[in-house]
Each structure stands twice: as structure tokens, then as C-alpha cells.
Image: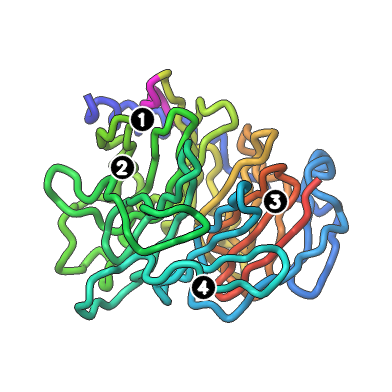
Amino acid sequence: MKNQLIVFTLSYLSVCISCSTPTEPSKVVVTDSAFGKVELFDSSAADIINTNAVVEVIGRNYKWCEGPVWVPAKQMLLFSAVRENKIYRWDGKDTPLVYLSPSGYTDTAFRDGENGSNGLALDKEGKLLLCQSGNRQVVRMNAPLDSPIAKFTILAKDYKGKRFNSPNDLVADRKNNIYFTDPIYGLPKYENDPTRELKFEGVYKISSSGKLSLLIDSISRPNGIALSPDEKILYVGSSDNHTKWYAFQLDSNGNIQSGKILLDGYPLKEKAKIKSGADGFKIDRYGNIFSSGPDGINIISPAGKLLGLIRIYNKQTSNCAFNETKDVLFITANDWVLRVKIK
């Protein structure tokens, strides 16, 4: 059944690609600040983000920060420092402090590559979920959020007996299904790493009962992942050289029914100063996608139209997260963590 789904999905994608390539946008408003600026390409974007929104740095000097998640119950931001094998916490007042160490690699043997946690999320009960690059698995922390310890319950560690590449990003729905991506970025030698066991980079679902399912095996470098507000659409970003954002319709059980390329980002990447692909992203209350990618955070409508860009100067953005009211966006960008106020 899975193979039939993939074939259907690919054929569907092939007919949709021509409708999703953006034209060169014309700038409506540009507001500059010390660390970045807001560029609006469509007048409707003025209802999403203030034209004078200021990009602020709230932390810096981390070794590739990633996977931010806002914890409403504790009013704190958590984010991964992947190459430090740590998670940091920011409470809105002080400098971010170490929250959990180790976060992604718990063995004592030397391992090269990206070892820390990457994507972070909260499950239905508010417990911390982690994609562990070093351990190559998806886990839940076995500790209260205000008393973190490096003890984990493994939710998924392999597919049909073969270890994952390096789980990268994840999202949990209201039924406690968990969706995650598994590119090769955490392997020391990427696709040529001798410890690699799977020959594809997958998108998976862990059901609320704990069953693992492979949803997609045809996307190169699947990276960011998110759900629409009604949880009927699963979005996946490809950070390959030909950047794309995909949209997949889900059935009532959270399985893929059909899919399409929502936005072909190749023209964006060709014009970008920082030629990064589609990395982590989040969805605002109206269904707009705020996605790391070429030159910063790309604001994309549910219809696949590029509405604007939160340009980040001289830094490659990796991910972002909203607070619970979705009027503040936190951004991880290389060694920076930033904050922008949204309408």
C-alpha cells in the first residue's frame, strides 16, 4: 500500500510543479534593523507582520542552534545547540542557560558529526519530544519540564530493523500522533557514511499507540515538518539543492491521501545570498507557513504564495517557533537566537 501511495504522490507532484513556481516579487515595504529586516512582497502580508517589526537577538555564540519550542506552562523557550549536545532554556529575562546535557548523544565513545538533539516538540501531555541526531532516534524525556534529566523513552529507533539516518524535525498532533523527518545531516559522512543503514530519507508517523509507519520515501533531504491548524495537511520541506515545500492531505487516521508541491523554491534559492534550503518551519493561526530557508524566514500562504521574508543578515536560519498566542516568533540562525513580534 505504501508503494502505491508513493507512486500516486509522485505522479500528482509532477503535474503540480508548474503551478507553484513563484515570480520575482516586488517589494512593498522594507524595514531595516541591526540584525535583519522585514520585506513584504504582497499587500496581504501587512496583516500578518508589522512593517516596522524589529529583529532582536536574545542569545548568541551557540554551536548551530536548532529546533526551538515554546513551553507555555513554564513560559520558556527551549532550543538545541546541536554541536554542543545541549539544550538551552530562555525564560524571557536572563541570558539562555543550559537546560539539558547531553541532549542527543548519550554514549561515551567518540562520534563525529552532529551529536545533539535537533527538533524539539511537546506531546499532547506537554512532555518534551526530541529528535536525537547522535543516538539516531526519536525519544521522550522521562522527567518533568522543570527538573530535566538525560533519561529518555525511545519512541522510534529503526525502520524494519535498520537504524534511522538522523531524525531531524518533528511535530505532534492533538491525537498524539508524531510525524518526523529523517535526512542524513547527522551522519558524519552524510549519504556516504559507513554506518548508514537505510538507503532513503523518510518521513514517518508514530501513532498514539506507538506504531511506526513510513509515509514518504521519495523526498530528497526532508527537513522541516508541520501541520495545518486543522491538522488535515502535513507540510514537509526539502532542503536539497532544489528547495521545495510539499503539502500532503491527511485522512482521519493521519495517513497521506494525496500530495503536491506547494512552492518550488528554486528561484528563491538562486537569488539568495545565503543559499540554504527549506529548513524548519511553523504555522501561524491563519495557516501561513513561516519557514527557514533562503535568506531568512520565508512567509508562505496556505495556497503556496510567497508573501514576505524576515531577512536575517549573514546567518543561515535553521528553524523557528511561535509563543502560545502566536504574536511572537523565535528564530534560530546559526549561532544566534532571535525574536520578532508578529501581528
Q: Quadrant of residue 77?
A: bottom right
Tell me the residue that label 1 is attached to.
9
Q: Are marks 4 and 2 in contact (CB under 8 Å)?
A: no
Q: Nearer the viewer, mark 3 or mark 4?
A: 4
The reply to whether the magenta stretch includes residue 254 is yes
Q: Is residue 278 visible?
A: no
Q: What is the magenta range?
A: 253-260
**Residue labelled with disc 3:** 24
Which of the 4 quarters of the picture holds residue 36?
A: bottom right
Q: Nearer the viewer, mark 1 or mark 4?
A: 4
Please tell me in which quadrant of the rendered image residue 213 appears: top left
Residue 56 picture location, percent across and down? 75, 68
- Which amino acid is tagged 3? Glu
Residue of label 2: 218
Judge by depth and name the residue closer to the eye, 61 or 279. Answer: 61
Above or below for 326 versus 321: above
Crowd band around label 3 with a 10 angstrom C-alpha radius: few (<14), some (14–19), many (20+): few
Amino acid residing under circle 1: Thr
Tag 3's secondary structure? loop
**328 vs 203, nearest the viewer:** 328
> Is the C-beta separation of discs 1 and 2 under 8 Å?
yes
- Judge depth for marks 1 and 3 and give the one in front: 1
Query: Which residue in the protein does label 4 denote?
Result: 98
Disc 1/disc 4 C-alpha distance (Å): 42 Å
